[in-house]
Amino acid sequence: MVSYFLGFHNASVGISKIYGPIGNKARYFFYKNQLNSVGENVFFPFGIIFSNKDISIGNNVRFGPNNTIGLVDFGNDIVIAQNVHFLSGKNQHGFADKNISMINQPGKLERISINDDIWIGANSVILSNISNGSIVGSLSLVNKTFQSFNIIGGNPAKIIRSR
């Protein structure tokens, strides 16, 4: 009902500011009713903001504080540290036409997938899919998809080693 009056994004921003255990429960019930699907044992901490409600989340997903989530689907068994930003692909902002200011140029939203058994380090930016069993090091910019069971990191991310 709140998102009907405020709009989903504004409601997400508002509910992100409720502190403590009450806030965690309020966010869980809000997103369970607003998103496409939310599995069991999903933790929505203080400061998490969703910009799109066309999102699915599997089981055993722990978001970190101050995550921002675009058009993303999450699998199962995922740990995400604080300040991780999931954008709606790498083309969500346009800039090709020099006669139109960048803020007014259309972009293209792309759905990205975060598969199963993933660990994402703090302060990372995710623009592309993340394959099963991957670890993303802190401060990484993931702008392409890598094969499963790799540890990736850096800006732009590259394979550090297999796991």
Image: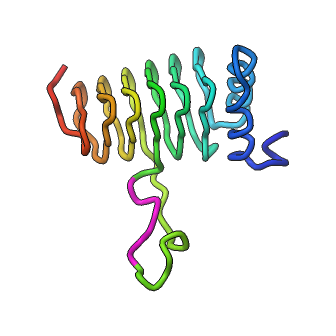
> Residue 98 vs residue 20: left or right?
left
Q: From which residue to which does the magenta span run? A: 90-96
Write the residue at 36% across / 41% down: 129
Residue 37 position by quadrant: top right
Which color scheme did the rendering employ for the protein? rainbow
**Quadrant the N terminus occupies:** top right
Q: Residue furthest left?
A: 161
- Judging depth in this view, the residue of 115 and 8 nearest the camera is 8
Write the residue at 30% across / 23% down: 133
Q: Residue furthest bottom?
A: 99
> Residue 163 vs residue 112: left or right?
left
> Residue 2 vs residue 121: left or right?
right
x then y, percent, for residue 108? 47, 62
Residue 126 position by quadrant: top left
Q: Is residue 51 above or below residue 99?
A: above
x then y, percent, for residue 127? 38, 46
Q: Is residue 36 above or below residue 132?
A: below
Q: Is residue 93 magenta?
A: yes
x then y, percent, for residue 103? 53, 69
Write the residue at 64% across / 43% down: 53
Q: Is residue 55 magenta?
A: no
Write the residue at 42% across / 39% down: 113
Which is the main secondary structure of the residues drawn in magenta?
loop
**Quadrant the C terminus occupies:** top left
Q: Is residue 99 above or below residue 107?
A: below
x then y, percent, for residue 34? 71, 37
